[in-house]
Image: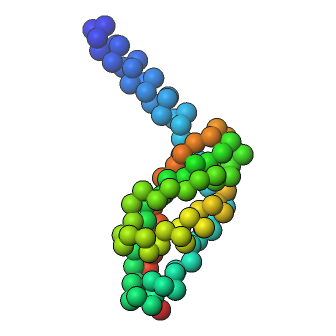
Amino acid sequence: MSILRSATVLAASLMLALAAHATPKVVKKVPPDFPREASQKGISTGVVKAKLTIEADGKVSDVEIVEAEPKRVFDRAVKQALMEWKFEPGEKATHEVKLVFKNED
């Protein structure tokens, strides 16, 4: 019975710890531009996953490309846009986002 109680207390503690590290709330999003070079190469879609470093004041201080398909086509546009994003002030944090590109022209 005490093992079950310990597991319940541990599970509750983990949920509280996870809640304390909630996803940062975006207050300003800037969409990335679709690169002209991608259109010229006939690329109409892409996906980029990036990791943001968010400072305590809510500003993004660094953007790291984690995955990109196709590689290196959308990286510059993603970095430029994400550096303009703003989050609610709080603790310094990292956060991953996934951006999907689709050119419908």
Q: Specify the farthest residue to the top.
A: 2
Tell me where residue 33 sits by quadrant: bottom right
The image shows residue 63, relative to residue 101, as above or below, that is: above
* 36 displayed left or right of 54: left
The answer to whether any part of residue 99 appears in the image is: yes
Q: Specify the farthest residue to the right.
A: 57
The image shows residue 29, relative to residue 26, as above or below, that is: below
At a point 40% along the width and 74% down the height, the residue shown is 46
Q: Please tell me which residue lies in front, 78 or 95.
A: 78
The answer to whether any part of residue 87 appears in the image is: no
At a point 45% along the width and 83% down the height, the residue shown is 38
Q: Please tell me which residue lies in front, 21 or 2.
A: 21
At a point 39% along the width and 20% down the height, the residue shown is 10
Q: Please tell me which residue lies in front, 39 or 101.
A: 39
At a point 56% along the width and 64% down the height, the residue shown is 79
* 27 displayed left or right of 19: right
Q: Quadrant of the N terminus?
A: top left
Q: Position of residue 2 (x, y in %)?
A: 31, 7
Q: Position of residue 98 (x, y in %)?
A: 45, 61
* 19 displayed left or right of 57: left
The image shows residue 7, relative to residue 85, as above or below, that is: above
Q: How many marks?
A: 0
Q: Position of residue 18 (x, y in %)?
A: 48, 34
